[in-house]
Amino acid sequence: MSKTIVFGHQNPDTDTITAAISLAHLIGAEPVALGATNEETQYALKEFGHAELPIIKNIAETGADSVWLVDHNEAQQSAADIKDFDVAGVVDHHRIANFETANPLFYRAEPVGCTNTIIHKLYVERGVEIPANIAGLMLSAIISDTLLFKSPTTTEEDIKAAHALAAIANVNIELYGLELLKAGTNLAAKTESELLNSDVKSFPMGDQTIRIGQVNTVSIPEVLDRKAALIAEMEKENAANGFDQFILIITDILESNSEAIVVGGDTSKIESAFNTPVNADVVVLPGVVSRKKQVVPQLTDAYNA
Ligand code: MG
Ligand code: MG
Ligand code: MG
């Protein structure tokens, strides 16, 4: 018996988990996860009556002979033993980097705001009906990845797919969307390390390694109350992992603004990237909500200048 598994990236977000579910349903595979779900994703799974996915440590332990990736392609964001397996398919909305296969594969990448927008298209193209609960999960992913269409990563196609999915799931996008996003902002119960690591990625910039985390909140001052403890933890992580600079973006999902705590490295790069001063380890970023579009490219330019 052949076995196909589908999974998204490490530190899973709502898109990664629900894309594994929706794509696995479409292609007749088993969805799995590379880590525990966050509170926002747990809210969506509960709302639409879907069980948590099995968490795997590596591909080998699953006995799978076929692997599909969703919401990522870069090896360092994937399963530890991904290099030992040939990927049969990818559905993704990120840059393609550090990815190669020995054999031909199915690869669908589009520059849209959410993997599930692409998967919605695959269902439509193949004439496959989307079950209401899976439609609700796919909608949750679009709301999450686009911050209710406020992120500059949002495309017309994401909005169109979201409305089609909301009709199937019988959900009011605005009302449900706000509840979903708020479910991910319960930060008080988290340790500093959990705040830093729930949504974090490393980026090579110039000859430096820049670590950029992001948390969503409804009150930036509430997070900044913990600044001293966060900075201590960021210093620890920089020293332990060789990060040159750690940036924690704190995003207000209601106002669509961010402030960031910056620890280590050359703060003049931050100041030139955003054309604003770093004051007491904090930089104010009006209108910034997307790491992918509004932070990484600007900072990469500054480091390469
Ligand atoms: Mg993702
Ligand atoms: Mg995504
Ligand atoms: Mg994200």
Image (cartoon, rainbow, N blue to C red):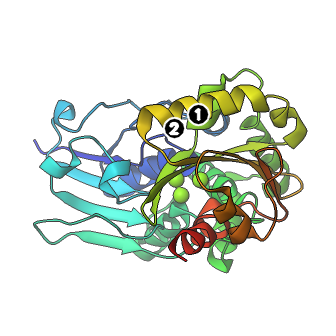
* Secondary structure category for the residue under label 1: helix
Please, is residue 262 above or below residue 126 in the view?
above
Q: Pinpoint residue 286: horizontal percent, then vertical percent.
A: 85, 63
Q: Pinpoint residue 136: horizontal percent, then vertical percent.
A: 63, 50
Please, is residue 217 above or below residue 271 in the view?
above
Report whether the residue tagged 1 is closer than 8 Å to ligand 3. no
Quarter of the picture holding the N terminus: top left
* Residue 20 shows in this picture: yes
- Residue 165 horizontal side relative to residue 3, left or right: right
Q: Residue at x 85, y 49 (%)?
A: 175
Quarter of the picture holding the C terminus: bottom right
**Considering depth in this image, is 36 or 4 the residue closer to the camera?**
36
Give the residue type that dot 2 points to: Asn
Residue placed under numbered mark 2 in the picture: 238
* Residue 49 shows in this picture: no
Please, is residue 133 above or below residue 156 in the view?
above
Name which quarter of the figure residue 61 lies in. top left
Q: Residues within 10 Å of mark 1 (few under 14, many from 20)?
A: some
Q: Residues within 10 Å of mark 2 (few under 14, many from 20)?
A: some
**Considering depth in this image, is 63 or 13 the residue closer to the camera?**
13
Q: Pinpoint residue 243: horizontal percent, then vertical percent.
A: 48, 45
Q: Residue at x 32, y 31 (%)?
A: 56
Q: CA distance from mark 2 to mark 1?
A: 5 Å
> Looking at the rendered structure, which numbered label has been put on residue 235?
1
Q: Residue at x 56, y 36 (%)?
A: 197
Q: How many marks?
A: 2
Give the residue type that dot 1 points to: Glu
**Considering depth in this image, is 128 or 70 the residue closer to the camera?**
70
Q: Pinpoint residue 139: horizontal percent, then vertical percent.
A: 64, 56
Q: Residue at x 49, y 61 (%)?
A: 129
For the residues labelled 2 and 1, say whether their Cβ atoms are less than 8 Å apart: yes
- Residue 27 horizontal side relative to residue 123, left or right: left
